Amino acid sequence: MYVDVWGGEMWIDVLKSTLKYGLAPKSWTDYLYLSVGGTLSNAGISGQAFNHGPQISNIHEMDVVTGRGDVVTCSLDHNPELFHSVLGGLGQFGIITRARIALEPSPQMVRWIRVLYSNFSAFTHDQEYLISLHDQPQSQKFDYIEGFVIVDEGLINNWRSSFFSPNNPVKISSLGAGSNVLYCLEITKNYHIGDNPKTIDQEVEALLKKLNFIPASMFTTDLPYVDFLDRVHTAELKLRSKGLWDVPHPWLNLFVPKSRIADFDKGVFKGILGNKTSGPILIYPMNKNK
């Protein structure tokens, strides 16, 4: 199953169009108001990438305008060198004008869970364990795995936004964390409205039992699939209403190997940054073979 999309279309419009048929792309970015051609020229990474790979791993075919002005159709079997060069090529090898995107049956609802860690090793161990289950049946794995670092106590309440309850303020000290730096594991389980709620509860509980988060730190909510995927836009609208969206916000993405992630935590999260930033620090666990 696939959909042909113009390179200038926004992912939010792709989602709305495919949902009419009960289908959706397999892999996403966290922010949907980006163009298809734009994210495919980078990578397109979100919490589904551990399972399906980034967006560039879920493309069947493209039309590309080359530097000579030619319009060339390329795929794994037809002009494969151009196909691989353009995907993640930062626009240096051609401009994507059409992409054939892989689809899958779309869930209707999402169980969205956030839990906190004070120990970085426990946090990364659990992330690595969860993404190792990518080949397991759907009932035995989460559908979305991400995480972020909290180095500013003010974030611990903003971080839940209006999606989560309880709404009462949370103090880091009240969690018995013993550290000024916390790590949040963000996970979801997809389901359909007609599914047995007890079954969803049991599947989630079985997976959570194997994790080592701070017991009192779990926050959970259920919401429609489209609302979960479009959650960053909801936050954007709140920031715009306060005049905070258009302020300068440098954005840096890095791939850090497993062998050096503990050093990165010590040197950057606990060292250089300390409590000097209020910006989001996201951690996406990735499977290299995806």
Image (cartoon, helix red, strand yellow):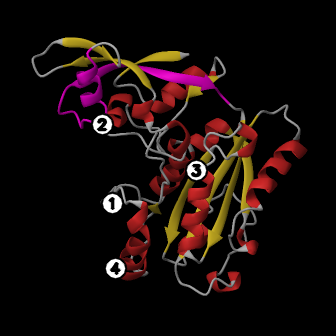
At 48% from the left edge and 76% from the top edge, which residue is drawn?
151
Question: CA gap, disc 2 to disc 1?
Answer: 23 Å
Q: Quadrant of residue 63?
A: top left
At 28% from the left edge and 20% from the top edge, which residue is drawn?
80
Cβ–Cβ under 8 Å for marks 1 and 4: no
At 41% from the left edge and 79% from the top edge, which residue is drawn?
266
Task: Please report the bounds of the magenta region as a residue range.
Answer: 79-106
Measuring from the top left, give residue 232's x and y in whole percent.
52, 49
Image depth: mark 1 or mark 4 in front: 4
Cβ–Cβ under 8 Å for marks 2 and 3: no
Considering only order in the chain, which callout, 4 or 3, is on the residue closer to the N terminus? 3
Residue neighbourhood size for the residue with mark 4, other residues' Cα within 10 Å, grouped as few (<14), some (14–19), many (≥20): few
Q: Quadrant of residue 269?
A: bottom left
Image depth: mark 4 or mark 2 in front: 2
Question: CA gap, disc 1 to disc 4?
Answer: 18 Å
Residue 66 versus residue 162 in the image, above or below:
above
Question: CA gap, disc 3 to disc 4?
Answer: 29 Å
Residue neighbourhood size for the residue with mark 3, other residues' Cα within 10 Å, grouped as few (<14), some (14–19), many (≥20): many
Name the residue type under label 4: Ile
Q: Which residue lies under the disc numbered 1?
A: 249
Question: CA gap, disc 2 to disc 3?
Answer: 23 Å
Q: Which residue lies under the disc numbered 4?
A: 272
Q: Is 6 or 199 nearer to us in this picture?
A: 199
Q: Is 256 or 228 nearer to us in this picture?
A: 256
- Using the rendered image of the protein, determine whether residue 159 is visible from the camera's viewpoint: no
Name the residue type under label 1: His
Q: Which residue lies under the disc numbered 3?
A: 131
- Using the rendered image of the protein, determine whether residue 284 is visible from the camera's viewpoint: yes
Measuring from the top left, give residue 265's x and y in whole percent.
43, 74
Considering only order in the chain, which callout, 1 or 3, is on the residue closer to the N terminus? 3
Question: CA gap, disc 4 to disc 2?
Answer: 30 Å
Residue 88, numbered label: 2
